[in-house]
Image: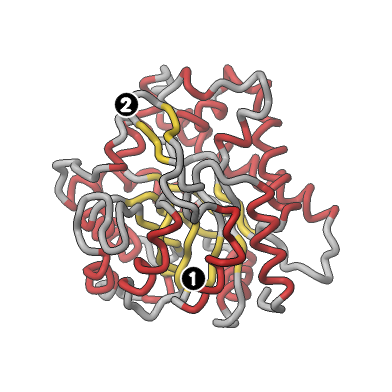
Amino acid sequence: MSSHMALTGLKELVADKSRCIVLDGGFATELEKDSRVDLSTSSLWSASLLLDRNAHLQQVIVNAHKTYFLAGADVATTTSYQASADGFKREGVTSIEDIEKLFARSIDLGVQARDAAWNEMDQSQRMKPLVGASIGCYGAALADGSEYRGDYGKSKEQLVAWHKHRFAFFTNYAPVDLLICETIPCLVEVEAFVNLLNEFPTSHAIIAMACRNGTELNSGEPIAHVSKILSKLKNQSQLVAVGINCTPPQHVESLLRELNCPWLKAVYPNSGEGWDGVNKIWLPADSGDGPSSWEKLLPKWYDAGARFFGGCCRTSPNDIRAIRDYFERRQLL
């Protein structure tokens, strides 16, 4: 990430404060469109496809990334959300060298897709897309739904120690353009990521939180308290954007307004359906404000400070295409 090219791409990304950046959408749903893929068999979820035994399925990851790029995504989010040393060890990958090989593979597959898509794009009309390393919250590695509750019982120091290896690896792996620290359900984990950004001054990140209503993180803590935590960043330019993901779309506008801070804001909500982490099934949406309402929601989110837009669980390339089309028509890309 310390490479000149990555920083040049990032600077271009955030230079114009009125310009919008399109993120990608739900990945697991896209991967499972291939009948050979069954992500429910491993607690690693989509990161299970990175394992050597699934080498025959890794082109499915490339194809999904490429589909999102061609649908309009400026940034890919890699399949490393649930990729952790603990998770890989449960699957029998025990050496640090082999674990880092899998971390690298998640990035390399994204880069492969980006380069293939870039060759098919009108390069005069687009910036070259970036590859963002997904760094999931601690709860994602537990695979018990605790990212939906934030009740870790861990201190900031424990969370820093747990995240540090993966954070350091992605910071120093040259093809990575930025880190995407996501689905963070509690304030103590936001603090941990601020500590890590301070410790690794060449890192650049989006920090995105998972929220349960219009004012609170999944832990029940007020999102309004986040700006004070972020102010402890020594170099505030390391934070590319701060925002909300993995959250029902009807809560987003309120959350953005509660998140009173000087950074660009990012938003990539779920489809509106709920996830039952115990039974591992999707529950129907409880509101009409799903992705089919992009035309209604996007201007509200833009007015509330959002500049990065995408989708999380159960959103699709069609949603990303709709987001890009909306902002293209308004000449905001």
- Quadrant location of the C terminus? bottom right
- Relative height, residue 94 to residue 70 (above, below): above
- Relative height, residue 265 to residue 192 (above, below): below
Compare residues 320 and 226 and report the one nearer the observer. Answer: 320
What residue is drawn where x is 71% and y is 78%? 331
- Relative height, residue 115 to residue 4 (above, below): above
Whole-percent x, y for residue 200 in the image: 37, 61
Left-right relation of 164 to 253? left
Q: Residues within 10 Å of mark 2 (few under 14, many from 20)?
A: few
Left-right relation of 98 to 144? right
Compare residues 113 and 150 and report the one nearer the observer. Answer: 150
Q: CA distance from mark 1 to mark 2?
A: 32 Å
Compare residues 280 and 160 and report the one nearer the observer. Answer: 280
Compare residues 251 and 97 and report the one nearer the observer. Answer: 251
Q: What numbered label is drawn on residue 105? A: none
- Relative height, residue 83 to residue 135 (above, below): above
Whole-percent x, y for residue 92 in the image: 41, 17
Left-right relation of 143 to 224? right
Amino acid found under the numbered disc labelled 1: Trp
Q: Secondary structure at mark 1?
A: helix
What residue is drawn where x is 64% and y is 62%? 323
Nearer-N-terminus badge (1/2): 2
Q: What numbered label is drawn on residue 301? A: 1
Q: What numbered label is drawn on residue 278? A: 2
Whole-percent x, y for residue 119 in the image: 84, 54
